[in-house]
Image (spheres, rainbow, N blue to C red):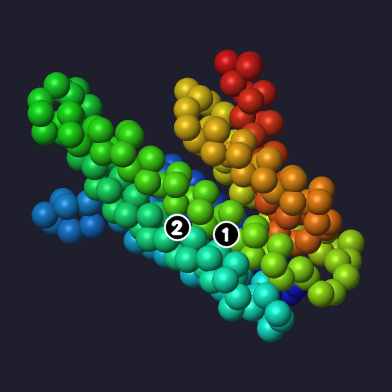
């Protein structure tokens, strides 16, 4: 559990750094003199997601252990879902961050040209579809790998508290991103993951990832719905 808490804390740190990266004025400076990207785009595309992906992979490896389920067809299937999800996440970040930069710099005031129409579609729609597909695949894979490899120790009150604390950071991040925007595919994805994690928690008991994800997604979902209702 110590390693699980540490890796979830890394994800919490990433959530904080994402907010700092987006809100900080220094990240609006250009990475190189040719102005190919700003630091905010570069960090969002290469630095912060890479940290999160490495933490997710190490988390998956921490959950797994030698058992009759190890390397069976179901386990291999969920590993493939995880790998494909990572690829789609990477593709979405590469598409979104570049086109978002171009959208804001060149197309914000004149979106009607063919070039800007294509840039805006990649920024606002296509990259989002790829991202949410990959996001669901990675998170569902971790949930069902936890289902295949139940935690073998007893969870202490400290474990529950640390799981809830780390979940609070990610849930707050979801709320900050979805609570004040138009409801779209993103909120549906959060609702789906909230239902899946809560169902696994109900049927399979208090496993670390079930507890963590249930708090994350229900906190993000309910907070976002309340904020939307009060707009």
Write the residue at 81% across / 51% down.
Answer: 203
Q: Which mark, residue 85?
A: 2
The residue that disc 1 covers is 141
What residue do we see at 57% from left, 59% from top? 141
Q: How many marks?
A: 2
146 or 124, nearer to the observer: 146
As drawn, is 109 to the left or to the right of 52?
left
158 versus 120 height, above or below: below
Q: Quadrant of the N terminus?
A: bottom right
Q: Which numbered circle lies on residue 163?
A: none
Q: Residues within 10 Å of mark 2 (few under 14, many from 20)?
A: many
Q: Which residue is located at x 57 percent, y 55 percent?
A: 139
Q: Contact, CB < 8 Å: mark 2 with mark 1?
A: yes
Query: Considering depth in this image, is 175 or 188 the residue closer to the camera?
Result: 188
Q: Secondary structure at mark 2?
A: helix
Say what secondary structure mark 1 lies in: helix
If you read the primary sequence from the N terminus, does the residue marked by circle 2 or circle 1 appear first? 2
Q: Is residue 10 visible?
A: no
Residue found at the very far front of the displayed protein:
73
Tell me where residue 194 sits by quadrant.
top right
Percent position of residue 65, x then y: 68, 80
Q: Position of residue 72 (x, y in %)?
A: 60, 75
Residue at horizontal 55 percent and vertical 64 percent from the top: 78
Answer few, some or many: residues within 10 Å of disc 1's Cα (few below 14, many 20 plus, some between 14 and 19): many
Q: Residue 146 in the image: x percent, y percent?
A: 69, 64
Q: Taking 199 as reference, is 96 left or right? A: left
Q: Where does residue 90 sit, x and y in percent of width and height?
A: 36, 58
User: In the rendered view, would you say 68 is above or below 151?
Assistant: below
Dividing the image into 4 quarters, which one contains the C terminus?
Answer: top right
* Residue 88, above or below 215: below
């Amino acid at each position: 559990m110590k390693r699980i808490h540490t890796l979830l804390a890394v994800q919490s740190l990433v959530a904080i750094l994402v907010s700092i990266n987006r809100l900080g004025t220094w990240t609006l400076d250009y990475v190189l003199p040719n102005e190919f990207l700003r630091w905010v785009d570069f960090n969002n595309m290469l630095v912060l997601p890479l940290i999160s992906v490495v933490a997710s992979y190490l988390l998956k490896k921490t959950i797994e252990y030698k058992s009759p389920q190890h390397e069976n067809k179901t386990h291999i299937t969920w590993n493939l879902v995880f790998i494909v999800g990572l690829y789609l996440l990477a593709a979405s970040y590469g598409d979104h961050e570049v086109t978002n930069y171009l959208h804001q710099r060149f197309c914000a005031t004149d979106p009607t040209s063919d070039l800007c129409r294509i840039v805006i579609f990649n920024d606002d729609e296509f990259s989002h579809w790829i991202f949410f597909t990959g996001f669901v695949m990675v998170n569902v894979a971790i949930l069902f790998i936890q289902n295949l490899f139940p935690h073998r120790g007893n969870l202490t009150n400290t474990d529950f508290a640390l799981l809830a604390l780390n979940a609070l950071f990610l849930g707050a991040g979801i709320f900050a991103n979805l609570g004040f925007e138009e409801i779209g595919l993103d909120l549906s994805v959060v609702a789906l993951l909230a239902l899946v994690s809560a169902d696994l928690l109900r049927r399979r008991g208090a496993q670390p990832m079930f507890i963590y994800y249930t708090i994350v997604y229900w906190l993000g979902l309910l907070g976002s719905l309340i904020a939307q209702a009060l707009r």
